[in-house]
């Protein structure tokens, strides 16, 4: 069994509806006293009512329109399906940003075919920006503006703009990972932090050149791959292998193969 571009066009249109529904749930709570819960016991791993209610809304829509499709979501786990298709949902990626009132949080929606992401969507509801990657292209939409975007094409790491959510070993990096990231940051021109998945959309847009992360799960990165790759970027784990082939959740995205190779060499030490 395979799929056609018409299939992807249909799913892309449906994904836009999903993102609109997630916006309706998240924006009614953003900067308006969203309820915050800790789901990790002694460690702080926040979730808000926006995360939960948005995911519930998306699941209802998928189950109604595509009842055979599988669903994997951050808050409510996996629902098995009876087809090669699986939706991967993270309705509020960057919950810490959401609870602090900053606008780097996003809604992530991916569609996988036989385990491989073939469609990805990154949506920032407050700024009304949306990036979608599918069929080898990445599209940006805001208000009445729609355009195809590309990465910067940068090859020289000394001119690179680098990002990670938290560069400290007290965040998502181990001590060794933080030291490895610091080597790349020292070689780059500038580093910016706390952008969450929004950094990957900016990489696809040509505004950031490298993003390096760790401790990511499937719902954190499935949507990012088609968006970055459709814009001409490269995404792997820190060994240069496909994301998800290690247990650390390490990820590096770069604007070009040359920049990717230079960053990988620095990460390896």
Image (cartoon, rainbow, N blue to C red):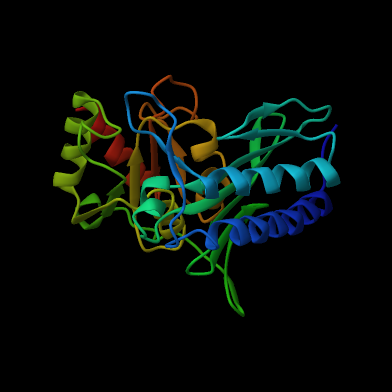
Residue 3 is left or right of residue 163, and the answer is right
Residue 96 is left or right of residue 93, and the answer is left
Residue 137 can be seen, yes or no: no
Q: Quadrant of residue 174?
A: top left
Image coordinates of residue 214 in percent, x first then y, are: 35, 32
Could you say which is closer to the camera, residue 21 or residue 145?
A: 21
Image coordinates of residue 194 in percent, x first then y, are: 30, 50
Name the residue rendered at 81%, 55% in the picture: 10
Name the residue rendered at 53%, 46% in the picture: 49
Image coordinates of residue 120 in percent, x first then y, are: 61, 49
Q: Is residue 149 above or below residue 37?
A: below
Residue occupying the far left of the picture: 186
Q: Is residue 207 above or below residue 246?
A: below
Q: Is residue 144 above or below residue 29?
A: below
Quadrant in the picture for the C terminus: top left
Could you say which is closer to the camera, residue 235 or residue 165?
A: 165
Image coordinates of residue 88 in percent, x first then y, are: 63, 38
Residue 176 can be seen, yes or no: yes
């Amino acid at each position: 069994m395979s799929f056609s571009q018409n299939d992807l066009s249909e799913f892309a249109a449906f994904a836009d509806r999903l993102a609109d529904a997630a916006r309706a749930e998240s924006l009614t709570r953003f900067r308006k006293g969203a309820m915050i819960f800790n789901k990790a016991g002694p460690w702080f791993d926040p979730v808000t009512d926006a995360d939960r209610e948005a995911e519930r809304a998306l699941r209802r829509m998928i189950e109604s329109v595509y009842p055979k499709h599988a669903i994997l979501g951050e808050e409510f786990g996996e629902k098995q399906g009876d087809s090669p298709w699986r939706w991967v949902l993270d309705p509020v990626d960057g919950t810490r940003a959401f609870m602090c009132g900053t606008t780097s949080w996003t809604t992530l929606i991916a569609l996988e075919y036989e385990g491989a992401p073939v469609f990805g969507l990154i949506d920032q509801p407050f700024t009304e920006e949306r990036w979608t990657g599918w069929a080898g292209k990445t599209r940006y939409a805001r208000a009445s503006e729609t355009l195809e975007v590309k990465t910067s094409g940068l090859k020289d790491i000394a001119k690179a703009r680098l990002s990670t959510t938290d560069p400290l070993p007290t965040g998502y990096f181990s001590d060794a990972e933080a030291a490895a990231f610091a080597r790349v940051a020292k070689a780059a021109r500038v580093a910016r932090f706390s952008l969450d998945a929004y950094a990957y959309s900016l990489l696809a847009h040509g505004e950031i050149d490298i993003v390096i992360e760790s401790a990511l799960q499937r719902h954190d990165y499935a949507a990012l791959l088609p968006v970055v790759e459709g814009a001409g970027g490269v995404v792997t784990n820190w060994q240069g292998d496909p994301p998800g082939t290690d247990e650390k959740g390490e990820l590096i995205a770069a604007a070009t193969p040359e920049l990717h190779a230079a960053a990988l060499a620095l990460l390896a030490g």
